[in-house]
Amino acid sequence: MSASRARRVVRVVSVAAAVLLIGTAVVQGMSAGAATTSTAKPKVLTPSQIQASSATQLFAGGLAVQKDSKAASVAFDLTARHETSEAKAITRIASQPVAIWLGDWFTKTQVVKVIDTAVAQADKAGKTPTFVTYAIPDRDCGGYSKGGLTSAQYLAWNTTIADTLRGHRAAVLVEPDSLAMISSCPSVASTRLPLIKSAVTALAGAGVTAYLDAGNSHWVAPNVIAPRLKAAGIASARGFFTNVSNFYPVNDETAFADRVSALTSGAHYVVDVSRNGQGWKGTWCNPKGAGLGKDPAVASGSTRLDATLWVKTPGASDGTCNGGPAAGAWWEAYALALVKLRAR
């Protein structure tokens, strides 16, 4: 359904704040431990090797938790002000692995620095970071998270990301909403599908595990999204993702994703569980009564599910709806409510 077009983390903080945070690693999270391993780079895998690997091989060591996220800085400030209960609540978010969003609010130099910092920390900890690209032209079809690069800029931007990630373990979720939203603005399909395919090709060539947008279980039907995934290059990717920035239960998403997988030659998938702890609450945009989902985890079974992730940054607004600030802006009151109503 169109109401599920959750607007993404355009900015967890403003551009100015994001630039300031780059110096201390603009990434999501807070160190969960002190694991140390060899920093030797793994070999660059081919697309066929990526597809044949297990989830635990691709996400070797587990999911990386970043040290200097917005949530971490907020928790630090709250502690300094002796707001102990609030600091503890926000630390609940900061202590988890959350995807790192790469968008058009970063210059080329900045996006390289963000990636370099994140992978260096992850490599040292022996874990795998997760990134999200979010700069497709005509992003969000003019909605709360509108923006994006030009087509020419987008091609170069993705090449930079792929080259920077080459030789590192990493997973990249390519452009949330980009394929599902074609249902709402079909005019973008002719340019968007080739652009995403070019991004997938670049990532695959660098040995990066990539996932494409499949919307969610209550948006676009499997037989509609599957041809888009094929046209966007899923044959060169690991698979697809569902429920990003949305609130549907895992069982809804896996049932939907299994049908999509069957239509895409058995593609694997990941599910965003960052805010689905209380399930669907009637709207995609800053719903009241939402809670954090289960902690992110790599799947160890034999299904096509690779991982349940925190992709949307808990505490980042969906947009100026239900009392929220601009899309992506930090909303502390909402973050505290998510923690209070978290899945147990």
Image: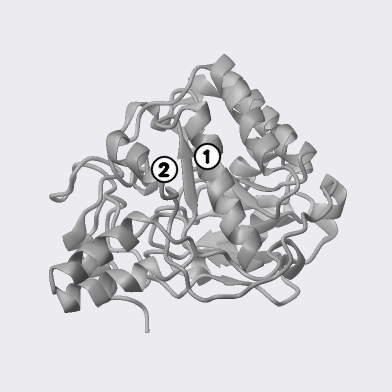
The residue indicated by pointer 1 is 113
Q: Quadrant of the C terminus?
A: bottom left
Q: CA distance from mark 2 to mark 1?
A: 7 Å
Q: Is 284 left or right of 44, judged from the image as shown?
A: left
Residue 136 sits above or below residue 265 on the image: above
Q: Residue at x 25, y 43 (%)?
A: 319
Q: Residue at x 79, y 51 (%)?
A: 265
At label 2, the amino acid type is Ile
Contact check, label 2 and label 1, Cβ < 8 Å: yes
The residue indicated by pointer 2 is 22
Q: How many marks?
A: 2
Q: Earlier in the sequence, mark 2 or mark 1?
A: 2
Question: Which image quadrant is residue 337 in?
Answer: bottom left
Do we see residue 197 in this rendering?
A: yes
Q: Residue at x 62, y 25 (%)?
A: 195
Q: Is 120 left or right of 49, judged from the image as shown?
A: left
Question: Which image quadrant is residue 11 in?
Answer: top left
Measured as percent of width and height from the top left, residue 123 is found at 65, 60
Element type at mark 2: helix
Measured as percent of width and height from the top left, residue 145 is found at 34, 35
Measured as percent of width and height from the top left, residue 71 is found at 32, 60
Q: Is 60 left or right of 68, judged from the image as shown?
A: right
| Frontmost residue, 118 versus 223 | 118
Check disc 1: other Cα within 10 Å, few if <14, some if 14-19, many if 20+. Answer: some
| Frontmost residue, 216 versus 92 | 92
